[in-house]
Image (cartoon, helix red, strand yellow):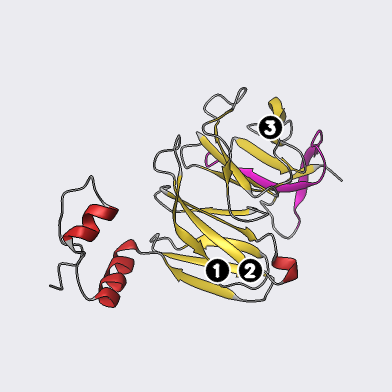
Amino acid sequence: DQTIILWDISFPETPKSLGQPLVGNFGCVNKVLFSSDGQILISGSDESIDLWNISEPVNPQKIGEPLTNNLGRVYDLLISHDGKTLISGNNYGSFIIWDITRLVNPRMIANPLISGTISASYLSISPDEQILVSGGSSLSVTIGGSTTIELWDISDLTAPRQLGNSLSGHSTPITSLSFHPNGLMLASGGWDKTIILWNIDINDWKSHACNIAGRNLTLEEWEFYLPFEPYRKTCPQVP
């Protein structure tokens, strides 16, 4: 019904709504998210993102104008611990990083990031907020394709970059992603009724690669792949 309702659950047996429903959203409301301090509510709908001041829950107020920068259908939202950064994922296969320091005038920090999927609907961020994970369905999933998960280095919000190749394992669209509190494991769930646990510990990756190779890079290989880095052993435990 394109509305948002705030509920008082002080007494879980008898929850009650607070004030009137929040109206003014564009289309179906697909995601709602509280800021860490509980003062701001962010909603994502079929055509926009809206910010609400809920410091007085019985009288919430919309903040500024809706964000409508070709968002598509917003399915997921993340907010940083400090409340200054917002990330939105949509059905266009892209996600956008926003600076919301000025709530009345949020701005895109970088150009929309395009994933390798038709839908970057679901997102998760590592506990240290250095890695973003996006998941969705590939362009050909309905005709035998696969779904993918992508990892992004967002340590520099102005220049995010993808880490390695996409992860594939689900046979149907991904519907949920979550980091382990230690940041070294990722869980993904999908329509295929399965949950996959992923080891994303970079040190383990390095060790596994060294075990497979059984040697260090040669000087010629190093100069080809890492021409601007001084040579060093990448696998200290092998010759």
- Membership of 49 in magenta stretch: no
Instruction: Name the residue furthest left.
Output: 239
How packed is label 1: few (under 14 Cα within 10 Å), some, or many (20 or more)? Answer: few
Image position of 7 with respect to 61: above or below: below
How packed is label 3: few (under 14 Cα within 10 Å), some, or many (20 or more)? Answer: few
Which residue: 15% across, 73% down?
238
Secondary element type, mark 3: loop
Q: Observer-nearest residue: 197 or 223?
A: 223
Position of residue 138 in the picture relative to residue 208 (left or right):
right
User: Where residue 204 sits: x, y (%)?
Assistant: 31, 68
Q: Nearer the viewer, mark 3 or mark 1?
A: 1
Which residue: 22% across, 76% down?
214
Kindly identify which residue carries mark 1: 168
Q: Type of residue at label 3?
A: Asn
Q: Pointers 1 and 2 in contact (CB under 8 A)?
A: yes
Dot 3 or dot 1, earlier in sequence: 3
User: Where residue 24 sits: x, y (%)?
Assistant: 81, 33
Q: Type of residue at label 1?
A: Ser
Position of residue 100 in the picture relative to residue 15 (left or right):
left
Q: What range of the chain is rendered magenta?
A: 14-37
Kindly identify which residue carries mark 2: 146
Kindly identify which residue carries mark 3: 69
User: Where residue 53 sits: x, y (%)?
Assistant: 65, 30
Which residue: 27% across, 54% down?
224
